[in-house]
Amino acid sequence: METAVNRESDLEIMTTDIIRQLGIPAHIKGYWYLRYALILCTENNEMITSVTKTLYPAVAAKFKTAPSGVDSNIRRAIEIAWDNKNEEVLSQYLGKTVLTRKKKPTNAKFIVSISEMLSIRIKMQK
């Protein structure tokens, strides 16, 4: 029987793995903010419907910072992933349509795409 703790640990491991595959280094704040945002959105998909009013304040509260700092640090982490140009990994998590546009996705688009992938993986494990 799988416990909530096991599912939570699995989600953290999967999220960390994806962020590392994307080439986002753990020494930047955006890594940790993005990681927590992805976990929150995967656990509660309502969070993504209001990124600036719900998600960023929740992440900011956890890390004792301002929501505007969360936004800019997540944006920087996404820029790093985008600039790494690992098209195979990017298309796996964001879809080929994002890559064909050659334009970096918004924070919300990036977060929703990856959290949807994580949700599917969690469901497949059950």
Image (tube, rainbow, N blue to C red):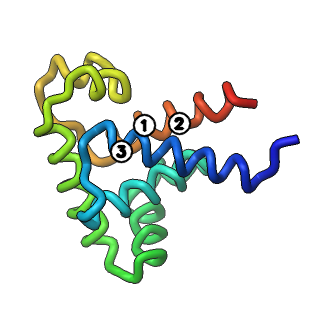
For residue 121, above or below residue 91: below
4 sits left or right of 122 in the view:
right
Tell me which amino acid carries mark 2: Leu
Nearer to the camera, 126 or 48: 126
Residue linked to disc 3? 19
123 sits left or right of 120 in the view:
right
Residue at (26% x, 18% y) in the render? 97
Residue at (23% x, 37% y) in the render? 105
Across and down, in percent, residue 102 comes to: 11, 25
Badges 1 and 2: C-beta atoms under 8 Å apart? yes
Q: Separation of disc 3 and disc 1 at Cα?
A: 10 Å
Residue linked to disc 1? 114
14 sits left or right of 125 in the view:
left
For residue 72, above or below residue 125: below
The quadrant the C terminus occupies is top right
Residue at (23% x, 53% y) in the render? 77
Badges 3 and 2: C-beta atoms under 8 Å apart? no
Q: Separation of disc 1 and disc 2 at Cα?
A: 6 Å
For residue 63, above or below residue 119: below
| Disc 2 element | helix
Residue at (37% x, 55% y) in the render? 34
Across and down, in percent, residue 59 comes to: 44, 68
Quadrant housing residue 100: top left
| Disc 1 element | helix
The quadrant the N terminus occupies is top right
Residue linked to disc 2? 118
Q: Earlier in the sequence, mark 3 or mark 2?
A: 3
Q: Separation of disc 3 and disc 2 at Cα?
A: 12 Å
